[in-house]
Image (tube, rainbow, N blue to C red):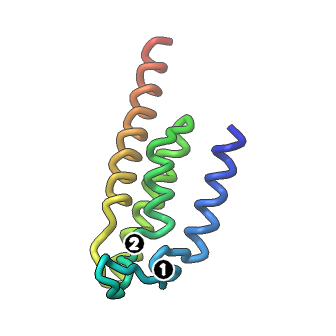
Amino acid sequence: MSHFVFFLVLFLILGFTGFSTTKRRHNMNTDTLGSVSPVAASKHDGFAIASLVLGICWVWGIGSILAIIFAAVSNKQAKAAGRSSSGLATAGLVLGIIGAALIVLIIIVGAATQ
């Protein structure tokens, strides 16, 4: 459980500080002929990655709710920057919705059996 908390805090810090791999990749690749071409930069942001990770790590429903929130923030930031939303954020949103639906289903079944 402590590993999960560590990674959750890490993703929160990276997401809120605006960390993105597109800002850090300035190195170059050389092909077999020796010409230099720039490395393709990743277009994923911290909120999209955190959304996917939290959607996968259900954590008794808390991860699902945070996955939905982080996916919404990631999509909002993508729209503000004029780019399409990330597939990671969409996957995190879907997994978060599935997890939230499971929470509701568990609550309903638990209430019905008592």
Which residue is farthest top? 113
Mark 2, other Cα within 10 Å: few <14 / some 14–19 / many ≥20: few
Q: Secondary structure at mark 1?
A: loop
Which residue is farthest right? 2
From the top left corner, tell me how far across and down residue 1 is, in percent.
68, 37
- Give 13 or 42, whichever is nearer the viewer: 42
What residue do we see at 40% from left, 79% from top? 29
- Give 3 or 51, whichever is nearer the viewer: 3
Q: Secondary structure at mark 2?
A: loop
Q: Nearer the viewer, mark 2 or mark 1?
A: 1
On screen, residue 78 above or below 82: above
Label located before the other in sequence (2 or 1) = 1
As drawn, is 13 to the left or to the right of 100? right
What residue do we see at 43% from left, 83% from top? 28
From the top left corner, tell me how far across and down residue 87 is, in percent.
31, 60
Answer yes or no: do the residues labelled 2 and 1 have beta carbons within 8 Å?
A: yes
- Give 111 or 21, whichever is nearer the viewer: 21
From the top left corner, tell me how far across and down residue 45 is, in percent.
46, 70
What residue do we see at 48% from left, 85% from top? 26
Which residue is farthest bottom? 35
Distance (Cα) linking label 2 and label 1? 9 Å
As drawn, is 54 to the left or to the right of 95? right
Per the rendering, the mark at residue 25 is 1
- Residue type, mark 2 in image: Ser
Q: Which residue is tagged 2?
A: 42
